[in-house]
Amino acid sequence: MRFERRDIISIKDFTRNEIDYILQTSEAIEPLEKSGSDMLHGKMLATLFFEPSTRTRLSFEAAMHRLGGTAIGFAGPEGASVKKGENLADTVRVVENYADTLILRHPLEGAARLAAEFAQIPVINAGSGAEEHPTQALLDLYTILKEKGQIDGLNIALTGDLRYGRTVHSLAYALSLYDVRLHLISPELLRMRREVLDTIRKEIKVTEGTDVSKVLPEIDVLYMTRIQKERFADMAEYAKVKGAYRIDHDMLAGVKDALVIMHPLPRIDEIASDIDTTPHARYFQQVRNGIIVRMALLALILGAAE
Ligand code: NCD
């Protein structure tokens, strides 16, 4: 399996074997998160972030540093020449002279694909509008695997903003490669995007609903998401769904003991803080897994791990 110089634009570009290989590499590289390594000494990544980020940008930079490489980049277009009107293709053709891989987050769907067409170096999509967030899906899978021992056979609910949430799009595509049952729980207005639904329905059993409490007793993994306020064209629509889903400690009566609750973060009000101290909460574990999976991805595409 070859990953060297490969772009990571959509999770759909990867087979189940390839995803499993990335997860195995993550497991193998996990000890280096503490000990550090000089595996990527002399390599540099550039982060081009046109949208806010805490975890994704910092974890890519941290992952690179842990493996002995370095990182440059900008967070927010304000400080970059984009502000002067430079287009994405030119920005990419400039920055690729400085770095070995580009990590791009952009509000437009298709932006990462476009950047990859112009760039000679590998591009990693760190979020393309409401479309996809493939590296988040990989760290989500890694978390499920670590917590549950396997992904096959699980009953999983994706909850919240399934229309605009890019993490659930990538995760749904990825999960459809496994033998899982998927429950999609959202307000009517925020149902899963048609194209995602059509694709995953060909592979796995999917149900849609609006009431999370109906599925809570039977699921193994509850994946919560934030309503993506910034993607709404009409704030009156947002007002209708704002705060639509919130789980708290009391709602967990009757759930499986081993239920795992995940969230890509940032959370607003979807998960009450009284859940943080229960054995179900795994969202901070996801954060830790984020750096491990990104170390593995960087090692793979920069040719240091095979
Ligand atoms: C997510 C994103 O940017 O799509 N954040 C992240 O990368 N962990 C989720 C979100 O913003 O709601």
Image (cartoon, grey):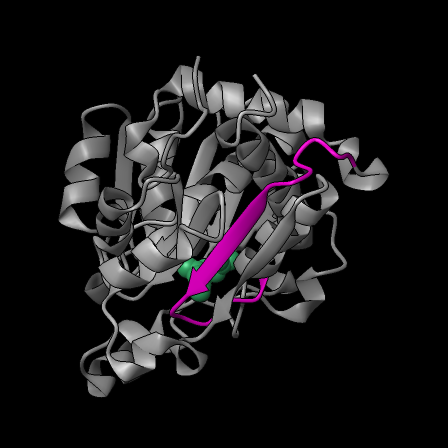
Q: In which quarter of the image is the C terminus?
A: top right
Residue 81 falls inside the magenta stretch: no
State which region is magenta: 37-55
Q: In the picture, residue 15 is in which quadrant? A: top left
Q: At 74% across and 48% down in the image, what residue appears? A: 279
- Specify whether 81 is left or right of 85: right
Residue 188's place in the image compared with 236, above or below, is above
Residue 175 visible in the picture: yes
Q: Give the overall secondary structure of the magenta segment.
A: loop
Where residue 232 sits: x, y (%)?
24, 76
Residue 97's place in the image compared with 86, above or below, is above
Q: At 52% across and 41% down in the image, what residue appears? A: 140
Where residue 302 sits: x, y (%)?
52, 32
Residue 138's place in the image compared with 222, above or below, is above
Residue 51 falls inside the magenta stretch: yes
Q: At 54% across and 68% down in the image, what residue appears? A: 267
Where residue 238 sits: x, y (%)?
28, 80
